[in-house]
Image (spheres, grey):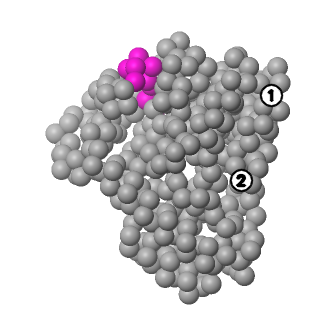
């Protein structure tokens, strides 16, 4: 009997951070960069039980796209929604990449950029970072006549660093016009640095820049799986042709629409992040743990100058029911990533880590 033939893909499966530790209850999960304050009270107050979930959702997410357009002052016709920004990354790779095309990603970056690129047969080229920061110079040096796309997250995950307005404009200027620059704005709301600007506002009218956004971070809708992309109309039109017909479920569309209306929640979340990022940064310095400057809702922790190793600290914290992200999956030795949690979670994390180190 003949065996089925199928393509074997040379990739490592994405491995999310831990969500459970044995039978320990009341875990503190600081491993996934999720919202510290949960989600908007507008969602909690509104009951969506009367919505007919037996009917298919709007395949074009018209109401959600209109609210995105209103909130961010951008063109409705240049917006597409997906089941998380992951799906939009996948669709971009399907649309732009053929076998042996090249995609440039930073040395340390969101793993789905490389995974989806490899699935369609493209070659992933890594641009070395400098002191855990995306290097524009190194990205440009890696471009060839086979380069079709460049992915960057700004600020970057998992390093927490960012490139400035000047640097990102220079990158787009020097890249060949035929190369699509994809900027992931997943954490932009938290950034209050004067030399930073989100991709949407920098390249709203660009013909060769595509912006990714998510509701999983500051909006607190990670389990809903909803994100959106913004780019030239011709690209958006083609993405609509290849996207699944009902890719964003009805509740996700409703929740995301309501979340966009609650500006007070976003302001509260930003203030919370600013307060705790400064407090945590000082604490890490007192323990000789090197970390990125305050900005996004997480820190990359470097234990090279600490008296204890990252793995030792990770295991000790897990025994106390506190989960951080091990950076070995990113090929980063002696590093952990910690999300900024609620006030109670942060205080307990500091207290526990203070006893360990």
Q: Which residues are magenta?
A: 74-82
In the image, residue 27 sits, relative to residue 11, either above or below, namely below
Between marks 2 and 1, how big is the CA–CA gap? 20 Å
Which residue is painted at 58% across and 16% down in the image? Answer: 207
Task: Check the picture and name the quadrant holding the C terminus.
Answer: bottom right
Mark positioned earlier in the residue sequence (2 or 1): 2
Q: Is residue 78 magenta?
A: yes
Q: Does the CB distance between marks 2 and 1 fall below 8 Å?
A: no
The part of the image, by quadrant, that contains residue 356 is bottom right
**Residue 232: x, y in percent?**
52, 17
**Residue 342: x, y in percent?**
39, 66
**Residue 229: x, y in percent?**
49, 29
Name the element at disc 2.
Answer: loop
Q: Foreground: 313 or 243?
A: 313
**Residue 95: x, y in percent?**
62, 20
Question: In this rendering, would 11 be left or right of 40?
Answer: right
Name the element at disc 1.
Answer: loop
Which residue is painted at 48% across and 70% down in the image? Answer: 279
Mark 2: few, some, or many residues within 10 Å (few <14, many ≥20)? some
Which residue is painted at 30% across and 36% down in the image? Answer: 257
Q: Residue furthest front?
A: 194
Q: Can you see residue 31?
A: no
Q: Residue furthest bottom?
A: 355
Question: In this rendering, would 187 be left or right of 219?
Answer: right
The part of the image, by quadrant, that contains residue 299 is bottom right
Question: In this rendering, would 210 be left or right of 261?
Answer: right
Which residue is painted at 20% across and 42% down in the image? Answer: 48
The part of the image, by quadrant, that contains residue 144 is top right
| Residue pointed to by mark 1 | 143
| Residue pointed to by mark 2 | 132
């Amino acid at each position: 009997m003949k065996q089925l033939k199928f393509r074997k893909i040379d990739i490592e499966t994405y491995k999310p951070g831990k969500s459970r530790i044995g039978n320990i209850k009341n875990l503190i999960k600081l491993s996934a960069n999720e919202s510290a304050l949960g989600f908007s009270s507008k969602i909690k107050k509104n009951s969506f039980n009367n919505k007919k979930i037996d009917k298919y959702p709007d395949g074009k997410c018209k109401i959600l796209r209109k609210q995105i357009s209103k909130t961010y002052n951008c063109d409705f016709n240049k917006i597409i929604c997906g089941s998380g920004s992951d799906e939009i990354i996948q669709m971009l790779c399907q649309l732009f990449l053929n076998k042996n095309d090249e995609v440039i990603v930073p040395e340390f970056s969101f793993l789905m950029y490389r995974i989806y690129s490899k699935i369609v047969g493209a070659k992933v080229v890594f641009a070395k970072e400098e002191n855990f920061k995306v290097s524009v110079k190194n990205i440009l040096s890696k471009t060839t006549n086979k380069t079709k796309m460049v992915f960057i997250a700004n600020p970057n995950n998992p390093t927490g660093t960012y490139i400035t307005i000047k640097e990102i404009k220079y990158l787009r200027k020097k890249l060949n016009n035929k190369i699509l620059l994809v900027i992931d704005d997943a954490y932009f709301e938290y950034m209050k640095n004067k030399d930073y600007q989100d991709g949407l506002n920098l390249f709203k009218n660009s013909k060769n820049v595509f912006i990714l956004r998510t509701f999983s971070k500051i909006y607190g809708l990670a389990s809903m799986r909803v994100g959106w992309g913004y780019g030239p109309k011709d690209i958006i039109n083609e993405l609509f042709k290849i996207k699944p017909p009902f890719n964003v479920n009805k509740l996700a569309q409703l929740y995301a629409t309501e979340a966009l209306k609650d500006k007070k929640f976003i302001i509260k979340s930003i203030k919370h992040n600013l307060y705790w990022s400064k407090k945590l940064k000082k604490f890490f310095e007192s323990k000789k743990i090197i970390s990125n400057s305050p900005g996004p809702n997480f820190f990359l922790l470097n234990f090279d100058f600490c008296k204890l190793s990252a793995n030792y600290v990770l295991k000790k914290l897990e025994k106390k029911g506190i989960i951080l992200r091990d950076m070995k999956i990113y090929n980063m030795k002696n590093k952990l990533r910690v999300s900024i949690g609620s006030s109670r979670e942060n205080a307990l994390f500091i207290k526990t880590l203070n006893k360990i180190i």
